Image: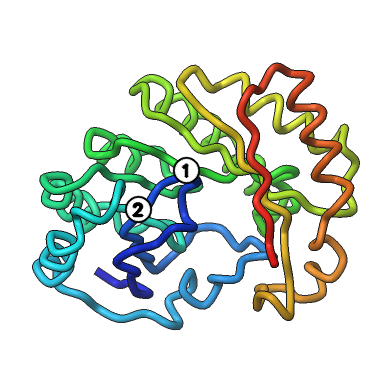
Amino acid sequence: MLIGGWKAVSMVDIPGKVTFTLWLCGCNLRCPFCHNWKLAQGIECLKVEKRELIEEVERNSYLVNYFHVTGGEPLVQWRELRNLLMEVRKYIPVSLNSNLTLVKPLEKIIDFVDHIATDLKAPPTELYGLPKNVSLKLWQLFLKGLEIVSENSIPLELRIPVSRGFTTKEIMKWVKEGLERIETDFYVVLNPLVGSPLTNPRDEEWCNKHCWADREIELIKEKLEEMGVRKIIIRKYS
C-alpha cells in the first residue's frame, strides 16, 4: 500500500474516540482547501507491507476504539484496503473516512467497516475543485454513497466543511439533499475551513477568499437545528 504514515494513538480524528489512524495516498478530487494535497497526489508517500502494519495495530489495539483509515481517498486503493481490513477487524472495529463518490469500491469493502466519516462539501461545484459537469456527476455518486451507508446501517459522522463567500441558502440546498439520503444513526461535525499559516492548502488564493468562516458556522448550525438535527459538533481550531 502507498501511505502517508500512521499515528498509533490519536484523540482528534473521531469526536470522543481514540483511534489508530492511517493515511492512504491518492484521491479522485482536487479540493482547493485540502491540506493533505501532496499526499492525495502521491507526492509524499511510502510503501508499507501489510504484515508490518497489522503487527503495529495489534500492539496498540487495547488503547484505541477504532482503526481509522483516511487520506487522500482510501477507496482509491480499495483492493489493498479490503485485504488489510479483513485482518485488522480481528483486533479492533474499523472506521473509514471517505468522500463516498467511489461507490463500487465502497460496496466491495462495506462489510468490513463499522463507522464512516464523510464530508458533505457544499457547494460541490466549488469544493470538489473540478469542472462543474464532473462535480455534479460526483455529487450524484456521493448521494448514492450515503444510501449505501444507510442500507448497511453503519453509524455516520457527517462532516460539513464551512466556507465563506457562499450564501447560507446556497449551502443548505446541498445539505438538505444529502440529509434526505441518510437513514442511519448520524451526527454532524461542522468544520470551519482553515488556511495558511495553520495549514498549507492546495489553492492558497481560493482559501484566502473562502477559508476562516466564523459567522457562517452559527448560521448553518441554526438551520440544521431547524431541520431537526439533534447532535451537532463544532470543531474548533487554535
Residue 138, picture quadrant: top right
Residue at 82% across / 74% down in the picture? 205
Compared with 50, 102 (above or below) is above
Residue holding disc 1: 117
Residue 95 rendering spot, x and y as whole percentages: 35, 45
Relative side of 132 to 49, left or right: right
Compared with 86, 195 (above or below) is below
> Could you tell which of marks 1 and 2 lies nearer the N-terminus?
2
Compared with 133, 181 (above or below) is above
Residue 139 rendering spot, x and y as whole percentages: 61, 39
Q: Nearer the viewer, residue 126 or 172?
A: 172
Q: Nearer the viewer, residue 97 or 124?
A: 97
Residue 203 rendering spot, x and y as whole percentages: 72, 73
**Can you say which quadrant of the picture contains the C terminus?**
bottom right
Residue at 37% across / 28% down in the picture? 154
Q: Amino acid at mark 2?
A: His
Label 1 – label 2 distance at C-alpha: 9 Å
Q: Amino acid at mark 1?
A: Ala
Compared with 163, 6 (above or below) is below
Residue 49, picture quadrant: bottom left
Which disc number belongs to residue 140?
A: none
Residue at 41% across / 39% down in the picture? 116
Residue holding disc 2: 68
Secondary element type, mark 2: strand
Residue 172 rendering spot, x and y as whole percentages: 78, 32
Residue at 11% across / 45% down in the picture? 90
